[in-house]
Image (tube, grey):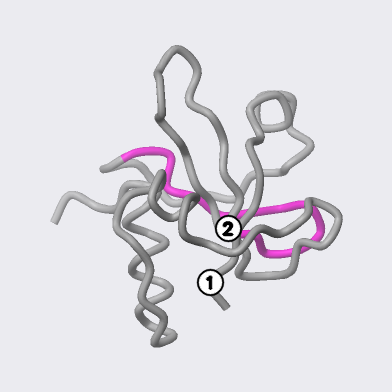
Amino acid sequence: DKGFDCSGLVVFTHARAGIQVPRKALDQFSHGLRVAADDLKPADLVFFKTPGRKKAFHVGIYTGNREFIHAPGRGRTVSRARLDNPYFKKHFMGARTFL
């Protein structure tokens, strides 16, 4: 009732497509199939390291054209961002898919 966090958005959207994914971003990263950054397709998941926190990840859903959607935090608006944004480029950890 307070909105989505990043991994909750992934769980919700994938469930709508009949795909079950783990609840936590770290588990999504660990269990998804690896995708090379040059091979990203819409619906692939893109993961980012959270600065200053061990084992903390942020996840978004790739939409194409080097863009993704993500929930910046519970209670904040789901938004679009670019992989070439300096912040996201610096903290990019990899991509996974559950398709």
Q: What residue is rendered at 41% in x and 72% in y?
A: 13
At 38% from the left edge and 51% from the top edge, which residue is drawn? Answer: 27
Residue range corresponding to the magenta coloring: 62-73
Who is closer to the viewer here, 25 or 62? 25
Is 82 situated above or below 87?
Answer: below
Element class at badge 1: loop
Answer with left or right where residue 32 lies relative to residue 55.
right
- Say which quadrant the N terminus sits in: bottom left
Residue 45, numbered label:
2
Nearer to us of marks 2 and 1 is 1
Q: Nearer the viewer, residue 83 or 76?
A: 83
Where in the figure is residue 68, as x and y percent of width and height? 63, 54
Amino acid type at mark 2: Leu
Report the residue that reaches farthest toward the right.
38
Point out the tag, 2 or 1, that comes first from the N-terminus: 2
| Quadrant in which residue 36 is drawn | bottom right
Q: Quadrant of residue 87?
A: top right
Q: Is residue 46 left or right of residue 35?
A: left
| Badge 1 density bin: few <14, some 14–19, many ≥20, Cα 10 Å | some
Q: Is residue 24 left or right of residue 55?
A: left
In percent of the image, x 63 and y 37: which residue is there?
Answer: 93
- Determine the residue positioned at 44% across, 51% down: 78
The residue at which mark 1 appears reads as 98
**CB-based contact (under 8 Å), mark 2 and mark 1:** yes
